Image (spheres, coloured by chain):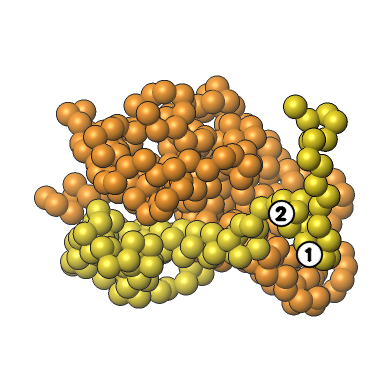
Chain colours: A orange, B yellow
Amino acid sequence: MARVHSLAPGGVRDQWQEPQRKKFYQDVNISQREDGLFEINLDRRKLKTPGGKLFTVPNEALAVAVATEWDVQKDTLKFYTMNLTTLCNTALDNPTQRDKEQIIAAALKFLETDTICYRVEEPPGLVELQTNEWDPVLNWVEKRYNVIIGSSSSIMGPQITEETKDTFRQHLGSYNFWALTGLEFVITQLKSLVLSFALVDRHLTVEQAVLLSRLEEEYQIQRWGNVEWAHDYDMYELRARTAAGTLFVHLSSESSSVKRKLLQD
Amino acid sequence: MAAVSSPLRVCRGILKELRALKGPEYKRTLAYNYVLDQFRKNQVSSERYCRAQKEALHSSQSYLCLLASSRCHVALHKLYHGKGERGPDEVADIVGLRLPTQPGGKGWEK
């Protein structure tokens, strides 16, 4: 039985300290069941979640991507490189036992302290950078969702109206449970609901969203210099996780399987 | 605002990453065949602005980003954080000292 970790509290960090698990399989394959779901096979064994459930994914793209995460492992299994597998495990096991409403509420909470709505008043270089880089994205999201969010340099942050919250609540509600799990993950990584929506709506690429999320760090790096083992390390980790989350949202949304059908007809 | 990278570049990028991960065997992986297949399928579209194409391109860019940044992350981890702690004799050796040996073992050890 293959056990990996999910996003339960402490789940991701624990992986660094864990004793290494040896790679116990040679071949990785996927198979489709009668109900359309896909399974991952490690040699002759079927992959299971940490909770003991059979590991199933809704479409081929996700199955291939997860299988690849397992296939590229070398002598020891590095679970921290298997972001898609981890997300699937979280969606399947739901270790924090939350329903859609609770996840949506958690996601909405981020709006009150959204990174791109929280502005500094100095130094002028950073103020200008925030205005030039964040305002366009904020405006785009406001226009697209027909909401007013605004930004603020007060310690209280932006004042989000109930209507704005309701609008976003509705949109979040339109995602299925899997996609929502991915979306909430992206929001917690980028520390911004606005950036996450811009990314998931494909207005930004992952690299752009990460850059915007780390704007202040990038500004400081420009001024004070880069420290590879900290700055680059954090950036690549954030990129990998955000990319995984974004891909997870897109692949989990029903439209991706429907579209494939239309193309084949 | 999303950067428009050509599908060809993204496809090549993904295949390069797969080769970096799997070595010469990479052409036989599930991912290699699936990715190539998807890029071929998405090439054909009669509309000038095909939403499905744009969406597929964004997803493939995300996947490329995932592969590339994971690789860089692991490389940096190995470089800076992979060594773990040194044992006490190694630490002593750095400053040219040696740990004392106690043939009877330390008092509290069994």
What residue is shown at x 73% (from left), y 43% (from top)? A112
Residue A110 lies in quadrant:
top right
**Could you tell me the amino acid type at mark 1?**
Ile
Q: Is residue A179 left or right of residue A44?
A: right
Can marks 2 and 1 be said to lie on one chain?
yes
Residue B94: which numbered mark, if any? 1
What residue is shown at x 41% (from left), y 63% (from top)? B64
- Front residue (pair A94, B80): B80
Q: Residue furthest left?
A: A265
- Disc 2 + disc 1, Cβ < 8 Å: yes
What residue is shown at x 63% (from left), y 42% (from top)? A17
Q: Alpha carbon of mark 2 to alpha carbon of mark 1: how far?
A: 10 Å
Q: Which of pointers 2 and 1 indicates the residue nearer the eye?
A: 1
Q: Is residue A134 something that shows in the picture?
A: no
- Front residue (pair A26, B98): B98
Quick check: A97 above or below A232? above
Tag 2 residue: B86
Quick check: A57 above or below A125? above
Q: Chain of mark 2?
A: B
x and y, in percent, of residue B28 in the image: 21, 59
Mark 1 or mark 2, which is nearer the start of the sequence?
A: 2
Label 2 neighbour load within 10 Å: few <14, some 14-19, many 20+: few
x and y, in percent, of residue A164 in the image: 64, 42
Q: In which quadrant is the C terminus of chain B drawn? A: top right
**Could you tell me the amino acid type at mark 2?**
Arg
